[in-house]
Image (cartoon, rainbow, N blue to C red):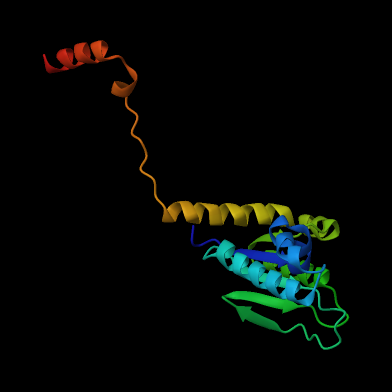
Amino acid sequence: MKDRKRLLIVDGFNVLRSGSRYKNISLDLPDYDHDWFNRAREMLLNDVVHYAGNEYRATVVFDGGGNVESTGEEQKVGGVSVVFSPAGSSADRIIEKLAYEGRENGFEVLVVTSDASIQDTVFGLGVDRMSAEGFSIEVDRYYHDAVLDEQPRIAIKRTVADRIDSETLAKLKALRDA
């Protein structure tokens, strides 16, 4: 279904704070240390790149409203759009605007956030939602499956002949060959 237009919008800081996959990064650092955020953001962006693949146009929105120098300018990282909301504006407003515009332009939209107010707003727009923890689980599953793909296992072929006793098998072969 390559013709489907799909848009993935990720509430960056919400996923970093609420998704179990990203909490483990901070075990050796104080809560929300600058290094923690940088490592966690990098991991999240890599995860979004892999999750989106060729199926979604993806945007990760971070809250930059409290930063007077934040312009809201979009940057591309690995094919994913990264936006820090402009000074004085919240990430919530940007996410809701992107979801609305996506639906208006015929996209199937998926918003990843655990923020109840965003979920309620985008649900009213007819947009799909996924929690931060749901995203963490999906990404973990993706990487687990990728490891399995790298180490293929030979499936054991189970046939009827494997499950019946040798005497019955011999009689069936005799009937077949008669």
Residue drawn at point x = 62 percent, y = 66 percent? 48
Q: Is residue 156 left or right of residue 71?
A: left
User: Along the horizontal axis of the image, is 15 left or right of 120?
Assistant: left
Residue nearer the viewer, 45 or 88: 45
Q: Nearer the viewer, residue 103 or 51?
A: 51
Above or below — where is 35 with respect to 55? below
Tell me if residue 171 can be seen. Answer: yes
Q: Quadrant of residue 28?
A: bottom right
Of residues 59 and 102, which is closer to you in this image? 59
Quarter location, residue 85: bottom right
Q: Is residue 48 above or below residue 34?
A: above
User: Residue 80: image x %, image y %?
Assistant: 61, 73
Q: Quadrant of the C terminus?
A: top left
Residue 14: give x, y in percent of width and height. Answer: 78, 64
Name of the residue lying farthest toward the bottom? 69
Quarter of the view holding residue 15: bottom right
Instruction: Tally the numbered discs.
Output: 0
Residue 97 % position (x, y)? 77, 70
Q: Position of residue 16 (x, y in %)?
A: 74, 64
Residue 129: tell me if it is visible: no
Name of the residue lying farthest toward the front? 28
Judge left or right: residue 143 versus residue 8: left
Q: Residue at x 57, y 76 (%)?
A: 78
Depth check: give the residue in front, 117 or 42: 42
Looking at the image, which residue is at 88% across and 81% down?
A: 88
Residue at the left extreme of this rendering? 178
